[in-house]
């Protein structure tokens, strides 16, 4: 049973560029959330997708956008990269929405902005 | 605004000790609390999920308790091993329709052989 998979695992960008990160959910999961984890900090909620719609959003600027596809996979896009966007980006998935189910996380995508 | 605190930020112990990791949260109106483990540079591995109606959960050498009224949870690790070395994070899901988890900063555990 494949868990949550993310790609790429590492990437380096320069300020002002754009990046796309990808997530495939655990088998049977249909809700995808994205989190940003800066070094030495706990993850911060970016947004959540269910039925191809953004259902909830954290305190992140519009430069952060996302998408969910019919097969439940998801992308996170960040435009106009800033040095402060350097972080580990984590995808988390679960079954259904509006419940208290367990979240399962991927290994993350490490983004470095120079 | 929910805030989650984990103290201390780091702990170093000899192998074999029984450990208690603490987590506190400011708003007791939560759906659940989840404990995670994170190895360096890696993602999060779910250890235990406690629903708000539960008092504790157990998995192997791990036992987590939840006291909603006091805003506290503890993760108990029995007979610690070097392989338990990692950062442990707790997170809560608030009530009121929120789907997000609010995390603490984590506690880095080192178990020395």
Image: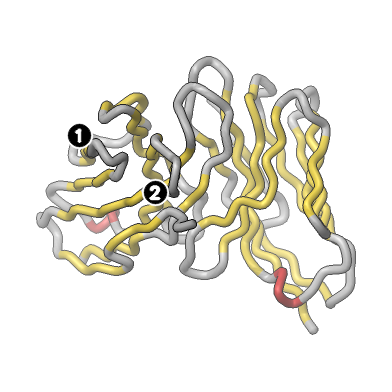
Location of residue B73 with respect to A25 vertically, above or below:
above
Residue A66 vs residue A79: left or right? right
Going from the N terminus, do you reach mark 2 or mark 1 first?
Answer: 1
Location of residue B4 with respect to B86 vertically, above or below:
above
**Labelled disc at residue A62:** 1
**Labelled disc at residue B58:** none
Residue A104, x across and y down, in percent: 51, 47
**Labelled disc at residue A91:** 2
* Residue A87 visible at all: no
Q: Quadrant of residue A10?
A: bottom left
Residue B14, x across and y down, in percent: 84, 77
Nearest the camera: B91 or A5? A5
Residue B96, x across and y down, in percent: 53, 15
Element under disc 1: loop
Q: Quadrant of residue B67?
A: top right
**Mark 2 falls within which chain?**
A
Location of residue A113 with respect to A75 vertically, above or below:
below
Question: Which residue sits at x=48%, y=34%?
Answer: A95
Quadrant assignment for the C terminus of chain A: bottom left
Residue A63 vs residue B55: left or right? left
Q: Nearer the viewer, mark 2 or mark 1?
A: 2
Disc 2 crowd, CA 10 A, few/some/many (<14, 14-19, 20+): many
* Residue A85 visible at all: yes
Residue A5, x across and y down, in percent: 38, 58
**Mark 1 falls within which chain?**
A
Does the CB distance between marks 2 and 1 fall below 8 Å? no
Q: Quadrant of residue A35?
A: top left
Q: Residue furthest bottom?
A: B113
Question: Which residue sits at x=34%, y=61%?
Answer: A109
């Amino acid at each position: 049973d494949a868990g949550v998979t993310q790609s790429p695992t590492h990437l380096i960008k320069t300020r002002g560029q754009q990046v796309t990160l990808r997530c495939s959910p655990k088998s049977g999961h249909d809700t995808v959330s994205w989190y940003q984890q800066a070094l030495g900090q706990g993850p911060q909620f970016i947004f959540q997708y269910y039925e191809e719609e953004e259902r909830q959003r954290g305190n992140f600027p519009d430069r952060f956008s996302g998408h969910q596809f019919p097969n439940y996979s998801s992308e996170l896009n960040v435009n106009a990269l800033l040095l402060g966007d350097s972080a580990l980006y984590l995808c988390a998935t679960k079954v259904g929405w509006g419940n208290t189910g367990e979240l399962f996380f991927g290994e993350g995508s490490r983004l470095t902005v120079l | 605004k929910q805030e989650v605190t984990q103290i201390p930020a780091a702990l170093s112990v000899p192998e074999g000790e029984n450990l208690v990791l603490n987590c506190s949260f400011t708003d007791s109106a939560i759906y659940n609390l989840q404990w995670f483990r994170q190895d360096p540079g890696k993602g999060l591995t779910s250890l235990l999920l406690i629903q708000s109606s539960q008092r504790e959960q157990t998995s192997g050498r791990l036992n987590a308790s939840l006291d909603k009224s006091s805003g506290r949870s503890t993760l108990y690790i029995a007979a610690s091993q070097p392989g338990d070395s990692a950062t442990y994070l707790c997170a809560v899901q608030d009530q009121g329709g929120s789907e997000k988890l609010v995390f603490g900063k984590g506690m880095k555990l080192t178990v020395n052989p």
